[in-house]
Image (cartoon, rainbow, N blue to C red):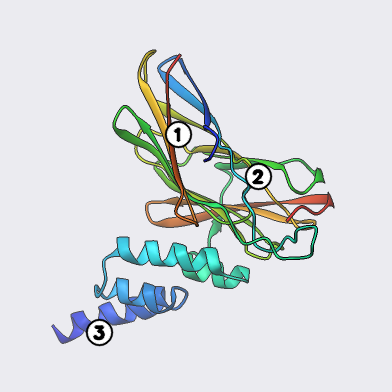
């Protein structure tokens, strides 16, 4: 029993290192994961740095994946309207998030993809300046990422 | 009163593609008006799309989604005449819900 608790704790620390307190609480079962992710998402939308945003999402070290396609223009003349498409062929894609590295708030949008809906989203975003656009895709609780630089001629934030 | 969301839903080969254009300023709270006063943040925070009564997409927006947010998504199923509804909530508590039939 003692060992079991210890192991749980070790795992909590290992995975919780990047998750912050909420993640840690979720791992040791003090709050339900659903509640944690809603809180995490809220914090992520308020985050001012990429580290903070990823931390709040529990996605500190996402793997890159060639099964995700991020389509943006190479050069955006108007940063107020930059078309972005994210397409994931990973099964089963649960969530798609779009972030912009150098925006005042990094997280642009988050989409929950229920079963039966394709891992596909097209939208238009604002970009303050030339920056990386990042797509995070959550599959079975694990995050994957792709990013692409978009040169912005006129900032539109 | 907000303007209606434009929705177009098309069924093809057993899948449905939905295109959505919401009418919203999406002010990020950092812009100023002509008098130099900050325009308060005013943006859509949550969206939800339903096929008949089943959720087919749910999303949360920050302030960096473009003015008059545009979305395209696809789901399996859907036949002509089915209802597609899209609703949104903004940070000032306004809501709007619009509905079309799949064509």
Whether residue A59 is visible, yes or no, is yes
Q: Secondary structure at mark 3?
A: helix
How far across and down, in percent of the image, does residue B56 sit? 38, 35
Which is closer to the viewer, label 1 or label 3? 1
Q: CA distance from mark 1 to mark 3?
A: 40 Å
Q: Secondary structure at mark 2?
A: loop
| Residue at the spot of label 3 | A6
**Residue carrying label 1:** A118
Task: Examine the rendered structure and indicate whether residue A4 appears above or below residue A67.
Answer: below
| Residue A8 location (% of width, % of height) | 26, 77
Is disc 2 on the same chain as disc 1?
no
Residue furthest out toward the bottom: A2
Of the pair A139 and A105, the residue shown nearer to us: A105
Residue under numbered circle 2: B67
Crowding around mark 1 (Cα neighbors within 10 Å: few <14, some 14 to 19, many 20+) is many
Q: Quadrant of residue A108?
A: bottom right
Residue A10 percent coordinates (x, y) = 33, 81
* The one of A91 and B70 positioned closer to us in this rendering: B70
Mark identifier at residue B41: none
Label 1 or label 3, whichever comes before in sequence order: 3
For disc 3, the chain is: A
The answer to whether any part of residue A60 appears in the image is no
In the image, are marks 3 and 2 on the same chain?
A: no
Q: Mark 1 — on which chain does it sit?
A: A
Q: Residue furthest left?
A: A1
């Amino acid at each position: 029993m003692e060992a079991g608790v210890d192991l749980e704790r070790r795992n909590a620390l290992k995975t919780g290192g990047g998750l912050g307190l909420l993640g840690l609480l979720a791992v040791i079962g003090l709050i339900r994961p659903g509640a944690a992710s809603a809180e995490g998402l809220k914090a992520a939308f308020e985050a001012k740095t990429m580290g903070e945003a990823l931390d709040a999402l529990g996605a500190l070290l996402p793997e890159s994946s060639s099964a995700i396609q991020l389509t943006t223009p190479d050069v955006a003349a108007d940063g107020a309207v930059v078309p972005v498409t994210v397409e994931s062929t990973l099964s089963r894609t649960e969530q798609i998030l779009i972030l912009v590295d150098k925006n005042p708030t990094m997280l642009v949008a988050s989409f929950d993809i229920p079963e039966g809906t394709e891992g596909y989203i097209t939208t238009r975003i604002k970009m303050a300046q030339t920056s990386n656009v990042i797509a995070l895709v959550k599959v079975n609780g694990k995050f994957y990422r792709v990013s692409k630089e978009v040169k912005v001629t006129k900032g539109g934030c | 009163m907000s303007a209606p969301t434009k929705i177009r839903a098309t069924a093809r080969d057993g899948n449905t593609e939905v295109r959505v254009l919401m009418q919203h300023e999406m002010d990020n709270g950092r812009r100023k008006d002509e008098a130099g006063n900050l325009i308060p943040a005013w943006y859509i925070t949550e969206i939800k799309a339903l096929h008949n009564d089943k959720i087919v997409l749910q999303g949360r927006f920050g302030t960096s989604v473009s003015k008059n947010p545009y979305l395209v998504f696809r789901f399996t199923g859907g036949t002509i005449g089915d209802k597609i509804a899209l609703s949104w909530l903004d940070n000032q508590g306004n809501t709007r819900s619009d509905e079309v039939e799949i064509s």
